[in-house]
Amino acid sequence: MNWQQLWKASEHYAAGSPSIPTAGAPSQHLAIVTCMDARIDPVAVFGLQLGQAHVMRNAGGRVSEDVIRSLAVSQGALGTRAILLMMHTRCGMLGFDPASLKAPRAGAEAMDFLPLVSLEGGLREDLAKLRESPWIHQDTAIAGCIFDVDTGRVIPFQPAN
Ligand SMILES: [Zn+2]
């Protein structure tokens, strides 16, 4: 990694007088939970601007304990009242096997990597987790969708039941 290149790019950013909102609370009262996949730019996908939404990302876009922690702060301290959960096609967490990690795996058996069996199954499970969490406000608008990394299209998710 060329750190110098990153520092230089950040200087260029600051020199361009970026319009950074003074308020930390997202003006659209929206929180997006999605995968860390480098092909996804959630702010651009939904035509959002800096300062309009919180974006929480992890491998798979799973509603993990830490995502619930962040959503609790997002809602409780910063007033968000809508959550969009977005998973995506060709996600690396589909059928992910922790044994495939080429990394030190001390204590790996204690880590739940939250692999996905299917996008639909994962969305159904995690949307239910959001609806059932005592940390999520009752009046929260919750939606799920799938991002197609080949076309850039978003397909709203309708659970079968
Ligand atoms: Zn992914």
Image (cartoon, rainbow, N blue to C red):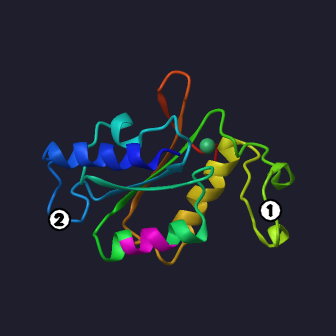
Q: Tell me which residue sits at (53%, 45%) in the image.
A: 1
Label 2 element class: loop
Q: Is residue 8 visible?
A: yes
First to last magenta residue range:
69-73
Q: Quadrant of ligand 1?
A: top right
Mark 1 residue crowding within 10 angstroms, few (<14) / some (14–19) / many (20+): few
**Of helix, strand and loop, which mostly describes the magenta segment?**
helix
Q: Nearer the viewer, residue 102 or 94?
A: 102
Give the number of marks: 2
Q: Is residue 136 visible?
A: no
Instruction: Specify the label residue 73 is tagged with.
Output: none
Q: Tell me which residue sits at (38%, 35%) in the image.
A: 45
Q: Nearer the viewer, residue 24 or 9?
A: 9
Q: Tell me which residue sits at (41%, 42%) in the image.
A: 42
Rendered view: 23 above or below 43: below
Rendered view: 135 above or below 67: below
Instruction: Specify the label residue 104 is tagged with.
Output: 1
Rendered view: 82 above or below 94: below
Q: Tell me which residue sits at (20%, 49%) in the image.
A: 14
Label 1 vs 2, first from the N-terminus: 2
Which residue appears farthest toward the top when viewing the image?
151
For the residues marked 1 and 2, what is the alpha-carbon distance in whole angstroms?
A: 41 Å
Mark 1 is on which residue type? Pro
Label 1 element class: loop
Q: Is residue 4 magenta?
A: no
Instruction: Specify the label residue 23 is tagged with.
Output: 2
